[in-house]
Amino acid sequence: MPVGGIGLSRDGGLADYVVVPASRLLHVGDLDLTQAAPLTDAGLTPYHAIEVARPKLRPGTTCVVIGIGGLGHMAVQILVATTAVRIIAVDTNVAALDLASRLGAHEVVQAGPDSVDRIRALVGPPPDGADVVLDFVGADPTLTTARQVVATGGQLMLVGLAGGTLPVRPVADEPPTVPFETSVMMPFWGTRAELQEVIALGRLGQLHADVQTFPLERAPEAYEALRRGEIHGRAVILP
């Protein structure tokens, strides 16, 4: 069976009721369920990626967040709440960039032909660059941006699963496709302990999902809106 759980690799998420082992449940207290629901994925996945990259996320370093969607807008808040890094948000959508600014991103860059140059103007020329790049898209254009703005010895965190390709070609007589001593990781989901910490951030008001709600009978409509790119943040299906 593929890696995953209910609603991801096997059916069971879109129903009035779902049977799960009691050991898999966590207490959310007075947290609104429309806010609690996105935390198990949109909150946990970026939290885990940030935890893995935390040794590089020292005070005064720079983190580029590519893709300010369901996961990316949560990543910005997690970085604000748990680090002292400079955050550069990148997205094609102006509204997403406005959201990133409101959530605490220090700089925003609209993705396009000149986005690498604009990010480089903020982080400096090689071997300097972003200490960590969190790519929540994972398509060819975003992977190209990520590898071109990361610092020598930096860390690329490939979270998005859009099926892009990251070329890795070690050479000495021309610039390598990925800077020397740069690590590349593909973090996936997270742990129960990390989810408890994510819930704590939510209950403290430091992590708030931008949600659009749909009743269960309109679930197909929510998926169509998602395919059209009309969902900003996270869609939550309510029974």
Image (cartoon, rainbow, N blue to C red):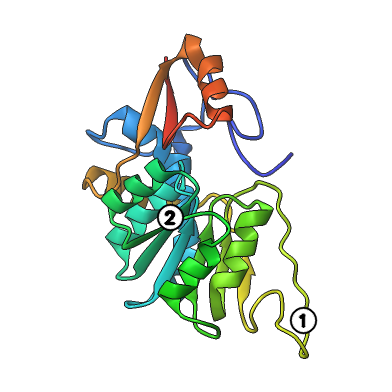
Count neighbours of disc 1 (C-alpha within 10 A) and say few if under 14, some if 14 to 19, many if 20 or more: few
| Above or below 235: residue 147 | below
Quadrant occupied by the N terminus: top right
How far from the left and from the top, in percent, is residue 90? 46, 56
Q: Nearer the viewer, mark 1 or mark 2?
A: 1
Please name the amino acid that badge 2 sits on: Tyr
Instruction: Give the numbered dot on residue 23.
Output: none
How far from the left and from the top, in percent, is residue 35? 33, 34
Quadrant occupied by the C terminus: top left
Question: Is residue 60 rendered to the left or right of residue 131?
Answer: left
How far from the left and from the top, in percent, is residue 97? 38, 49
| Quadrant of residue 180 within the rendered picture | bottom right
- The answer to whether one can see residue 186 in this image is no
Mark 2 sits on what residue? 47
How far from the left and from the top, in percent, is residue 58? 37, 77
Depth order, front residue of 192/75: 75
Please name the amino acid that badge 1 sits on: Pro
| Above or below 162: residue 18 | above
| Quadrant of residue 181 within the rendered picture | bottom right
Report helix, strand or loop for mark 2. helix
Question: Is residue 142 rendered to the left or right of residue 177?
Answer: left
What residue lies at 61% left-to-right and 74% top-to-bottom?
183
Mark 1 sits on what residue? 170
What residue lies at 44% left-to-right and 74% top-to-bottom?
121
Q: Farthest top residue? A: 217
Q: Tag 2 or tag 1, which sits nearer the N-term?
A: 2
Report helix, strand or loop for mark 1. loop
Question: Is residue 66 rendered to the left or right of residue 211?
Answer: right
Q: How many marks?
A: 2
Count neighbours of disc 2 (C-alpha within 10 A) and say few if under 14, some if 14 to 19, many if 20 or more: many
